[in-house]
Amino acid sequence: MNRRPLFFASLCAVAAPLALLAPRLPAQNAPARPNARPATPSSQTPGVVTIRNSPQGTAIYDDARGIAKLTKDVTIVQTGEDFILRAQEATYNRPKNQAFAKGNLSVETRDSTIKSTTLFADFNEKTLNFSGNVVINSHGKGDGIVAKRSGFSSDVRRKPIRITCNNAEWNYETRQAQLTGNIRIYQEDNVGTCSSIFYDEGQNIVQLRGKATFGNAKKQTFIGEDLLIYVDSGQVQSKNRVQLKIPSNDPVLGATPRATSRAPLAFPTPSAISDEDLAIFNRPTPTRPAQNRPAPQTTPLPTATAEAEDAPEDAENLQETE
């Protein structure tokens, strides 16, 4: 049974309280958004969340609970914010101003496209939490949101970068992300691994935290703690002890990483709103420390001892960086 007329009649009740949301002031330690576009007149109140779906989809709104559930080509935007969320199914909680989405999930930001299995969004906190098979492609050539519609800024001078992981928390106000679980980072012919990543889209800087490695197709590898990668300049820096491995003779010098393919994800048929839908939102509000943007380094690259690939990796082969 199609209940679309009931949903859209009730959508006014959804939009009314959202219209009262004022733009959030940036945190004290939050960096300013570079190259931010000047404010333009708008008929919509900043902060309002708008959800749409295809005419072929279904839409149900439970006014008593303040829960809306939509299927088929769902899009979610927030006035004044540079992102577009796309999914095949989305559940929206009006009282908490949160949403859960899945199915061909993708988010376009000012210069990146992010895909994952599921997503939990908090529109008050300005965070998007991605889970399962997360892939972040920062295009660097205006291939993201700006290429498909006007009114968005873009950082067209950036070099592209690709990151895969299990989980990512993206703050679309500061354009910074925390990534964890099974991390791989690709930048041109370079590949890196680490335990967690702090990514700054605005500056195109990646901090590989914990024990990290970053190397190219020629098997020249940079190993150290908390590596800082300046993607646009190609610099890799660290304040800690590092090791640089350069093979003397390798038959596969110049080889490029083999491309991998991933089978498409299968998603269940959407169902009506249930108590399980409401349970998604019954979780404590996380308390996170202020995120500090890493300061660009002005010191030259640290020197390190070059060694053969088969040399023992002990303390004598490591050199303290200044």
Image (tube, helix red, strand yellow):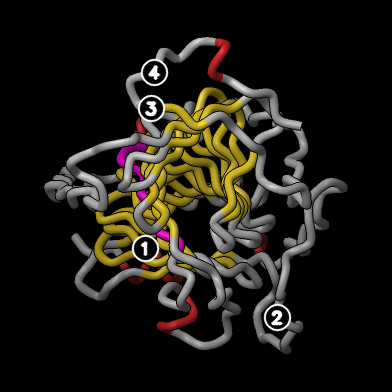
The reply to whether callout 4 and callout 2 are in contact (CB within 8 Å) is: no
Q: If the image is split into quadrants, where does the C terminus sit?
A: top right
Q: Nearer the viewer, residue 13 or 235?
A: 235
Q: Position of residue 83 (x, y in %)?
A: 52, 66
Residue type pointed to by label 4: Ala
* Label 4 sits on residue: 311
First of labels 4, 2 by sequence position: 2
Q: Secondary structure at mark 3?
A: loop
User: Is 300 displayed left or right of 224 in the figure?
Assistant: right
Q: If the image is split into quadrants, where does the N terminus sit?
A: bottom left
* Label 2 sits on residue: 37
What residue is at 37 percent from the left and 44 percent from the top?
191
First of labels 3, 1 by sequence position: 1
* Label 3 sits on residue: 308
* Label 1 sits on residue: 86
> Is 132 covered by the magenta stretch?
yes
Which stretch appears magenta? Answer: 131-138
Q: Answer whether residue 300 is visible to the viewer in this image.
A: yes
Residue type pointed to by label 3: Ala
